[in-house]
Image (tube, rainbow, N blue to C red):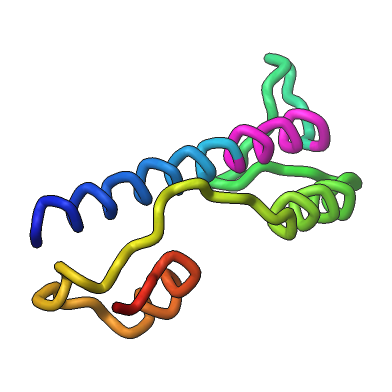
């Protein structure tokens, strides 16, 4: 992959990674707000899941709102020029659609 194309992909990945980190931080705030709390003051985990008890629907509503929020990504678009030899699965092209510019 040419250097310019690799840098564009790297910038996009950094930007998306920051968004994922922000969403996870907000999800953990919801967990702390709605999860059942153990004697140690920490959210109770059973298996690999937090327990919410009677507040499950409140957590689900808050998490649904979080996932439905639109986020603006300021990374530059990915141009197809310079990426002619990159093999990409079709599902990934669909996912990257808003970031791709055909030339």
Q: List x then y, in percent, for residue 10.
A: 27, 47
- 78 or 17, which is in the foreground? 78
Check if residue 30 falls in the magenta segment: yes
Q: Is residue 87 left or right of residue 80?
A: left
- 44 or 26, which is in the foreground? 26
Taking the spot 14% from the left edge, 73% from the top edge, the residue there is 86
Check if residue 91 falls in the magenta segment: no
Q: List x then y, in percent, for residue 60.
A: 80, 54
- Position above or below: 4 against 79: above
Taking the spot 60% from the left edge, 47% from the top edge, the residue there is 49
Q: List x then y, in percent, for residue 37.
A: 76, 27
Q: Quadrant of the C terminus?
A: bottom left
Q: What span is colored magenta in the figure?
A: 23-34
- Position above or below: 90 against 4: below
**In which image quadrant can residue 29 be found?**
top right
Taking the spot 40% from the left edge, 52% from the top edge, the residue there is 76
- Position above or below: 13 against 39: below
Q: Is residue 96 left or right of residue 74?
A: left
Q: Quadrant of the N terminus?
A: bottom left
Residue most extreme to the bottom? 90
Q: List x then y, in percent, for residue 89.
A: 27, 80
**In which image quadrant can residue 23 be found?**
top right
Residue most extreme to the front? 103
């Amino acid at each position: 992959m040419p250097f310019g194309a690799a840098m564009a992909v790297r910038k996009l990945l950094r930007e998306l990674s920051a968004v994922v980190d922000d969403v996870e931080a907000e999800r953990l705030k919801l967990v702390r707000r709605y999860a059942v709390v153990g004697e140690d003051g920490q959210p109770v985990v059973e298996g690999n899941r937090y327990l919410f008890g009677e507040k499950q629907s409140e957590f689900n509503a808050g998490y649904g709102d979080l996932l439905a929020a639109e986020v603006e990504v300021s990374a530059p678009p990915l141009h197809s020029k310079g990426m002619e030899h990159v093999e990409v699965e079709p599902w990934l092209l669909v996912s990257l659609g808003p970031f791709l510019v055909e030339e």
